[in-house]
Image (cartoon, rainbow, N blue to C red):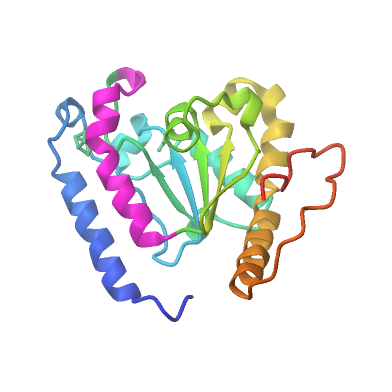
Amino acid sequence: MDETRDYETILAALQEIEAEVRACTACALHKGRTRAVPGEGPVNAEIMFIGEAPGRNEDQQGRPFVGQAGQLLQELLDEIGLTRNDVWIGNVVKCRPPGNRDPQPEEIAACAGYLERQIDLLQPKLIATLGRFSMEKFFPGARITRVHGKAKRDGTRVLIPLFHPAYVLRNMAAMPDAIRDIRKIPRLLDRLEQVLAEEAAGIAVPPEPEAPPEEPEQLSLF
Ligand code: URA
Ligand code: SF4
């Protein structure tokens, strides 16, 4: 808990966004939805996982990542001692595209404001993107096969692109990388805290010592 933040007001604002999303008709996806999926997590979440769009199970339950991909996400969170109740989980697009087709640019644009407001309210220390459309928002032009697991600092937070769990389920060969990538998160948070404290104290931050060869990208962007 950050004592300087008014969690009651933040929670009320988050709930207001959820209500807006559930009633939203700003793009054509509202026509086919059973339920919109605003996203969920504790008001003091330090980590946000941002996926693509709801699938069939999510559309039925109104909750993100509750199908097979969600099961794998939970298993990956286990790797770092977290459960889905410890983190915020949501999507760039809040309503299910018909037949799980890709969200269209105009749908992503129409929906973007909700996620941006959620990020502004939650002020996460780390945002992990899951999938192409979420990555594109934070790492424009990046290719997941090249940048997965490579963190980048963005002001007072860290961004890290991860494989989408649904992709890992279709390509089990990606599993070791998916596990290695998520295991970086605790160290990234520690390192961020250290760097921010040093900067606040006016101490010049020395460059990272050379990373071990199996993790050449690990905190090199800090
Ligand atoms: N895939 C996503 O991108 N989001 C969900 O909520 C579920 C599956
Ligand atoms: Fe509104 Fe987003 Fe749903 Fe489109 S996808 S109707 S913009 S909440």
153 sits left or right of 37 in the view: right
* The image quarter in which residue 147 lies: top right
Q: Position of residue 97 (x, y in %)?
A: 29, 24
Residue nearest the viewer, comparing 192 with 79: 192
The relative height of residue 124 versus residue 34 in the rendered view (above or below) is: below
SS majority, magenta: helix
Q: Position of residue 182 (x, y in %)?
A: 65, 44
The relative height of residue 98 versus residue 57 in the rendered view (above or below) is: above
Query: Residue at 54% of width from left, 31% of height from top?
Result: 164
Q: Position of residue 190 (x, y in %)?
A: 67, 62
Residue nearest the viewer, comparing 174 with 208: 208
Query: Residue at 27% of width from left, 20% of height from top?
Result: 98
Query: Residue at 67% of width from left, 51% of height from top?
Result: 222
The relative height of residue 149 versus residue 14 in the rendered view (above or below) is: above
The relative height of residue 206 versus residue 158 in the rendered view (above or below) is: below
Identify the magenta region: 99-123
- On whether residue 105 falls in the magenta region, the answer is yes
160 sits left or right of 23 in the view: right
Residue nearest the viewer, comparing 63 with 150: 150
Q: Quadrant of ligand 1?
A: top left
Tally of numbered discs: 0
* The image quarter in which residue 134 lies: top left
* The image quarter in which residue 212 lies: top right
Query: Residue at 25% of width from left, 28% of height from top?
Result: 107
Residue nearest the viewer, comparing 98 with 198: 198
- On whether residue 126 falls in the magenta region, the answer is no
Q: Position of residue 67 (x, y in %)?
A: 45, 36
Single out the residue that lies furthest toward the bottom. 3
